[in-house]
Image (tube, grey):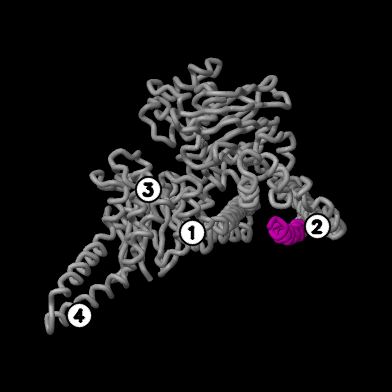
């Protein structure tokens, strides 16, 4: 075992963040910590690494084990170059190498015992150098830098000139080269492109140590995690497996907990009704039964209501009107900044109802393309045109659609003056802005909060063509899933840039990969892209970029109809579920669609019959209960009549009549007791 966390609790004033959180990390284990924004994940990491003291509980790092931590804003020395900063991690090997060279030089002038002593020292130093992989550290350092997206041309760039995201990548590289027994990473993929994320996944999967990760990247967690630690409502639950395993088990547990809660609530209401009914009979037996049931009810361990699944935001995107079939046509589009060419001669079309994802390395021009389509930037060459009745809704990662000086309330009311105060507050509440939050200024919001405001405006816009730039940035997993569901039910057209592979997998019908200044088209989701990518790129390289459009079309066996976007893409949306297409463009498996029809029909019939039998049984019990209640009511009415007769002075002198009524009432009471017992059973 590397680390043990036992009953950790932490509160900030009245706000309890963590309560009795316990888990342990074994050698070589890869664990993910998940939870909504604000659940306390980063607080827990800071407690684990000793940056913050818990209010209660203990964290134990096994003696002799080392720990490395990468915060979201990893610190680096800005006086160094990128290469020097990573090289500082290997200073002990550099010192060993220097001492080895000094020994080699000194041995040239020594003899006898002095030479023997130097040779012994030299052997010890070279052994330590070899054990520390001294002969590999430079190539290892180069590999890490390239893997994290730094080309050799940038190795000499001063760290002080880097952006915040680049500095975080440098800090991550330093941590990986230190090779601690336990690596703790807080959102390590935030500033990485897809290639760098894929490299980091492979590195961590093969890492000879344990890893703890906090991340909202579900695809990343799926590949890395062997254990998931969930923080929910201040408490922790440990699940074995990756993120998908956790999601399935979590939903099963949530459904079971909700079913148990609802069943108990029904039982409580039922028992209260039975108690009330028994007391209304006002007999000695019925009162005793009521008191007995009340005691049992008081002893019941009442369950708390489980949290609802994804109730934090509700998004429904509805186009005001339908666009024409041709939504967007791009022809010979090109853009460069100075000598840096981003893309050229780009041709593609988007049809109504398609969901198209644009992917590619950082800096290749994906966001620039979206800005051109929204007329924020002009193209250098080529043109584009929108189809009939196309209305664009734009979501940009810098949130330029927002006005920093305005409050949230003003941001909505100024753009949508037809909404009243209650409607505006309801819209903002759906995106977690309640009470005085609506009077916060946009400029004072976090990145995630600005993203939610932009999504709120997007929802109100009723556009039929959504153009989204990194829409999942700063969203937690639950919010991402809400957005995914909203886009999947959206009847309009979507074009978006994203690094979130899980999001792309769930929402994309088609992928445009920006590579070598061109867009390569893949008719499917991200898994389909991975399956076909190598074959398509091999075909592109075989004929060269100039003839790549023909190569994409001709490589049917490997590419499944995927191609460069200079080829017409009118059939691009054929496979809306991302299913793999066969070489001729048809969907695999259609011919077999009826193979299991009869067994499926038979199973369905059996299910139907079982449901009908269950419904008949329930109806019979309901009828029996109704009849029992009717009998009880009739006998109780007759019992009241007898009581009235026995109180009548005229009958008081009729001995035979009094005896007859008393005998009838005794029999009636006995029958009522039997009916009460029968009703109690049926009412269960």
What's the magenta region? 664-684
> In the rendered image, which quarter contains the C terminus?
bottom right
What is the number of the mark on residue 607?
Answer: 2
Q: Is residue 115 above or below residue 64?
A: below
What is the number of the mark on residue 120?
Answer: 4
Report, in whole angstroms, how far the alpha carbon at label 1 lies from the one at label 4.
Answer: 40 Å
Report, in whole angstroms, how far the alpha carbon at label 4 lies from the one at label 2.
Answer: 82 Å
Q: Quadrant of residue 503?
A: top right
Residue 538 position, x and y percent, is: 62, 50
Is disc 2 placed on a helix, strand or loop?
helix
Residue 157 position, x and y percent, is: 32, 43
Q: Residues within 10 Å of mark 1 (few under 14, many from 20)?
A: few
Asked if the residue under mark 4 is in contact with the one under mark 1, i.e. CB atoms within 8 Å, the reply is no
Seen from the viewer's position, the closer of residues 6 and 30 is 30
Q: Which residue is mark 3?
A: 169
Which callout, 3 or 4, points at the residue further toward the start of the chain? 4
């Amino acid at each position: 075992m590397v680390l043990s966390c036992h009953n950790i609790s932490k509160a900030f004033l009245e706000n309890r963040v963590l309560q009795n959180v316990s888990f342990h990390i074994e050698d070589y284990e890869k664990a993910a910590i998940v939870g909504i924004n604000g659940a306390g994940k980063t607080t827990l990491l800071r407690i684990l690494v000793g940056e913050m003291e818990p209010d209660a509980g203990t964290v134990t790092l096994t003696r002799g084990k080392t720990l490395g931590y990468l915060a979201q804003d990893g610190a680096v020395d800005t006086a160094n170059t990128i290469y020097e900063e990573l090289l500082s991690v290997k200073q002990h090997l550099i010192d060993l190498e220097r001492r080895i060279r000094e020994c080699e030089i000194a041995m040239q002038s020594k003899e006898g015992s002095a030479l023997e002593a130097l040779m012994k020292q030299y052997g010890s130093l070279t052994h330590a150098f070899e054990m520390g992989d001294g002969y590999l550290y430079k190539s290892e350092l180069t590999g890490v830098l390239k893997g994290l997206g730094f080309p050799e041309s940038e190795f000499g760039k001063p760290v002080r000139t880097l952006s915040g995201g680049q500095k975080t990548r440098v800090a991550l590289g330093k941590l990986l080269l230190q090779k601690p027994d336990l690596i703790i990473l807080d959102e390590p993929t935030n500033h990485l492109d897809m290639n760098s994320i894929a490299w980091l996944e492979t590195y961590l999967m093969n890492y000879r140590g344990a890893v703890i990760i906090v991340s909202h990247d579900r695809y990343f967690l799926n590949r890395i995690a062997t254990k998931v630690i969930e923080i929910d409502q201040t408490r922790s639950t440990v699940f074995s497996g990756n993120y998908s395993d956790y999601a399935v088990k979590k939903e099963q547990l949530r459904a079971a907990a909700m079913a148990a809660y609802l069943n108990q609530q029904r039982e409580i209401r039922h028992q209260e009704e039975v108690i009330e009914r028994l007391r209304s009979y006002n007999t000695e037996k019925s009162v005793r039964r009521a008191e007995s049931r009340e005691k049992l009810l008081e002893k019941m361990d009442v369950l708390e209501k489980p949290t609802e699944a994804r109730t934090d935001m509700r998004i429904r995107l509805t186009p005001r009107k339908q666009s024409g079939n041709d939504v967007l046509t791009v022809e010979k589009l090109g853009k460069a900044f100075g000598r840096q060419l981003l893309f050229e001669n780009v041709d593609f079309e988007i049809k109504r109802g398609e969901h198209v994802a644009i992917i590619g390395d950082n800096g290749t021009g994906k966001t620039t393309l979206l800005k051109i389509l929204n007329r924020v930037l002009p193209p250098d060459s080529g043109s584009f045109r929108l189809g009939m009745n196309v209305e664009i809704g734009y979501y940009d990662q810098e949130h330029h659609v927002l006005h920093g000086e305005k409050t949230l309330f003003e941001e909505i009311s100024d753009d949508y003056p037809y909404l009243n105060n209650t409607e505006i507050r309801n819209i903002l509440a759906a995106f977690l802005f309640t009470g005085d939050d609506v009077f916060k200024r946009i400029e004072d919001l976090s990145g995630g909060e600005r993203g939610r405001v932009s999504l709120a405006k997007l929802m109100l816009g009723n556009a039929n063509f959504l153009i989204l730039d990194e829409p999942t940035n700063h969203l937690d997993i639950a919010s991402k899933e809400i957005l995914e569901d909203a886009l999947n039910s959206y009847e309009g057209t979507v074009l978006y840039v994203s690094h979130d592979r899980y999001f792309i997998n769930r929402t994309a019908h088609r992928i445009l990969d920006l590579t070598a200044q061109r867009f390569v088209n893949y008719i499917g989701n991200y898994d389909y892209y991975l399956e076909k990518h190598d074959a398509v790129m091999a075909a592109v390289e075989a004929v060269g970029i100039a003839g790549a459009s023909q190569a994409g079309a001709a490589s049917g066996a490997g590419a499944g109809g995927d191609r460069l976007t200079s080829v017409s893409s009118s059939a691009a949306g054929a496979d809306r579920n991302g299913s793999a297409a066969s070489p001729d463009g048809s969907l695999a498996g259609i011919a077999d669609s009826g193979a299991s029809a009869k067994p499926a029909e038979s199973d369905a019939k059996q299910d139907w019959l079982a449901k009908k039998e269950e419904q008949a049984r329930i109806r019979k019990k309901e009828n029996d209960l109704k009849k029992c209640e009717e009998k009880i009511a009739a006998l109780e009415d007759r019992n009241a009549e007898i009581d009235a007769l026995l109180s009548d002075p005229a009958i008081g002198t009729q001995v035979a009549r009094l005896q007859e009524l008393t005998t009838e009432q005794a029999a009636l009471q006995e029958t009522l007791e039997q009916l009460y017992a029968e009703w109690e059973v049926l009412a269960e």
